[in-house]
Image (cartoon, coloured by chain):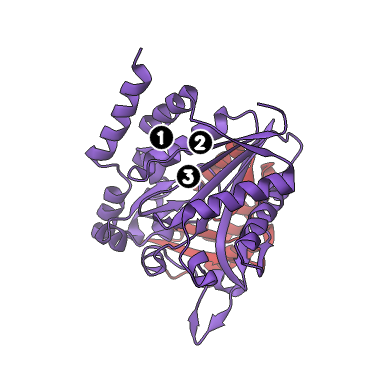
Amino acid sequence: MNHKTICKEKKHPGGKLVKICVNIMGGEVQGVLLTGDFFAEPENAVEDLISSLLNLKCHLFELKEKALGIIRERSVKIIGINEEDIEKALSDILENPDP
Amino acid sequence: MMSNDIRVLVAEWPSNQFFNLAFEEAFYRASDKPTMRFWRNDKVVVIGRLQSPVLEVNALEALRYGVKLVRRFTGGGAVYHDLGNLNYAIVLPYADMNIEEAFKLVGEVIVEALKTLGLEKAYYRPLNDIEVDGLKISGLAATRSHDRVFVHGAMLVSSNIELLWRVLKISSEKLIDKKLTQSRVKRVITIREALGRSIDPGEVQEAITSALQRKLGLKPLNSDLSKKELEQAVKLYWEKYSRPEWNLAFTEELRNLLTSEEYNALRLISKPSPQQDEIVRRLEEIINEP
């Protein structure tokens, strides 16, 4: 089955860079990787957040809602990026789902 | 040590970049009093804790030029180190200080140091950059725990900027804060270029410790590394910094973005050589001497 990885990045002026990559197989999300040059605390909580996103499996149309839901439910202080940056990167992926 | 002193140590293993980063974490964890470290690395890309090597490093170029890859324990972006780069790290026992405040405090110390070297146009740019006339000269990263803050940075003294651009992948989004010159983007500058003269890393080190004393009232006291720091660093080297599980985290997830040559190059540059492991074994012998 066709497996592709799509990455998009966002940065607001003066902010840090967020890079989001989504693995997609046959129209299904097979994991989301959140990386970038931002800072986060507490350290363990951000690692839990990243692994929860990596384990996210859903339909492509649910991607934004599910990924943002995981981020909102974790009490991680992310320094340098905001939710809007993440939302925009996810929207870019949905609008231009080509690697 | 008096309460208004700061312990200053020069502890470096430039030919083992993996051990240098292991010591950095050991140093942070062991320091419950104001402490500063200066150190240099030979050619290496140091990525931030939350970055994927796949998206940050041109692995084939790095392999070709003998540039290694190590992940550090703090967030922030990828940087290129060589012997023309001076690294500084500072631990302060300020339990109530947040990361943003720590960046500002250390950023202003570094700016003060650059001004005394003659770079009047240096300024701190939040969140974590020091710039001269719109060009980055030093970048900071930080973390904190319940009783201390830790800030470290890389200062471009006389680094090979051409090689820096070869081995780092540059994001187009990152350029929005930077200035364009003649259709080419110039984003960084070394102290040597900014001053128009050659400069020794020792001179920069001296300027930073003097600025620390003036801005924070902390008197520098030269010190050796402790056995505790060394023991912890050796442990961190074998268990973490020499291992692909740490350096190549977030790689397998993006495996299909890499050719097999790029993937193999990443594996090679992120692994210490037998000679590098030997350096650490010799340190272990020193620790174990009666």
Q: Quadrant of the N terminus of chain B?
A: top right
Pinpoint the chain carrying mark 1.
B
Estimate the spatial distance between the alpha carbons at disc 3 and disc 2, rounded to whole Å.
8 Å
Q: Which labelled disc corresponds to residue B240?
A: 1
Q: Is residue A82 left or right of residue B46?
A: right
Q: Residue furthest bottom?
A: B182
Which element is circle 2 on? helix
Question: Measured from the top left, where is residue B137 in percent x and y?
Answer: 55, 63
Callouts 2 and 1 close, C-beta under 8 Å:
yes
User: Which residue is found at the position 70% from the left and 39% from the top?
Assistant: B218
Q: Amino acid at mark 2?
A: Glu
Q: Amino acid at mark 1?
A: Lys
Q: Is residue B1 left or right of residue B154?
A: right
Which element is circle 1 on? helix
- Shade representing chain A: red
Q: Nearer the viewer, mark 2 or mark 1?
A: 2
Q: Amino acid at mark 3?
A: Arg
Q: In this view of the protein, which residue sits in the foreground, B132 or B2? A: B2
Q: Which labelled disc corresponds to residue B25?
A: 2
Q: Quadrant of the C terminus of chain B?
A: top left
Q: In this view of the protein, which residue sits in the foreground, A17 or B233? A: B233
Question: Measured from the top left, where is residue A25 in percent x and y?
Answer: 40, 57
Estimate the spatial distance between the alpha carbons at disc 2 and disc 1, rounded to whole Å.
11 Å
Chain given the colour purple: B
Say whether disc 3 or disc 2 marks the residue closer to the N-terminus: 2
User: Which residue is found at the position 56% from the left and 57% from the top?
Assistant: B139
Query: Which residue is denoted by mark 3 in the rendering?
Result: B72
Which of the 4 quarters of the picture holds residue B254?
A: bottom left
